[in-house]
Image (cartoon, grey):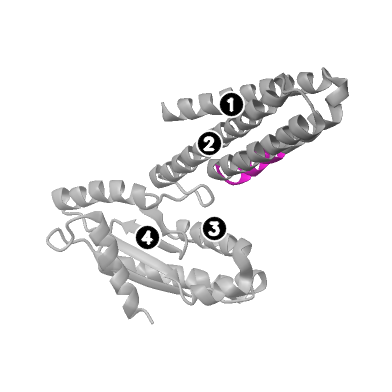
Amino acid sequence: MRRLQSSMVSDGAFIFLIIVCFVCIVFTAGNPNLYIQNIIFLNLALLISIVTYFTNVTTGLILNILFIFGYGTFTLYQTVVVGGVVGPQNYFWLIMTPLFTITTWLLTYGNRQLQLENEQLQKANKSLATVDAKTSLKNTFSFQSDATIFMALSVRYHIPLTLLVFSVKYWDEIRRIIGEEQLMEAVLDLSQMSQTSIRTNDSLYLLNKENPMWGMLLFTDRPGASIVIDRLRNSVEERNRDEYREKYRVELILKMGAIEYDAKEVPNPLEFITLAKKQLEFDV
């Protein structure tokens, strides 16, 4: 509803601005004797509206007050000194210049509201999305949903469940060496490599994208998770000897930690992640 209102304000202001411009052009062209004078006032009105567009309505209104004061002084000079007659010409720009400003402000206001709503929608979509667009991996939002189900299955059927988390050592230093574009390539390569190292009934998640941390929900006990850890280390070491060394000019070394699910110690999925992350501290 708010988006519709902002769109109507923006569209209405745009149409009204065209009408105001048309009226000013017709008025300016309709009096050849005052053509230059009207052109100057038209340019001043447009200049004030442009300043309003890039600043705010308060600035526009202040400029309009200065314009009215200056125009009033000019009219007084024309009447008293030159001996001119006060007519419709003298009132036209006093009305049209503020109209220009108000219309421009409404257009700006509507556009900014639309931009703000668009940013809010993008943030909402990002937080509610269950799959990362670049790596095609499930994220933390999806992890919470899946982990709740897997934890319940583990308790009901007495199936061991282990959360394995891993990240890259010295990530901040690597970020400064290889650049942002290659950073995302490294995240994608490690994600694909990790996906091939687990069984089809296990799940891989990208829990943190800014400072990458991956999570694996494994239907196995802690010793079984150690096998996956060794498999991941060997895969990375093989790639470090050729592919990663040539591509990134640095070695990618993993920090890994795992914890087996215990219903008494792990009340929810987020606590499961917290406990698993603590295990990373022991992998030095």
Residue drawn at x 87%, y 23% is: 33
For mark 4, give the secondary structure. Answer: strand
Image quadrant assignment for residue 70: top right
**Which span is picked out in magenta?**
46-56
Q: Nearer the viewer, mark 1 or mark 3?
A: 1
* Residue 157 in view in this figure: yes
Residue 188: mark = 3
Distance between mark 2 and mark 3 Cα atoms = 41 Å
Distance between mark 1 and mark 3 Cα atoms = 46 Å
Residue 215: mark = 4
Q: What amino acid is labelled 1 in the image?
A: Ala
In front here: 196 or 62? Answer: 62
Residue 109: mark = 2
**Mark 1 neighbour density, 10 Å: few (under 14) some (14–19) many (20 or more):** many
Q: Which residue is mark 1?
A: 13
Quadrant containing the C terminus in the rendered view? bottom left
Pointer 1 with pointer 2, Cβ within 8 A:
yes
Residue drawn at x 27%, y 51% is: 147
Residue drawn at x 66%, y 27% is: 96
For mark 3, give the secondary structure. Answer: helix
Question: Is 174 positioned to the left or the right of 210 in the image?
Answer: right
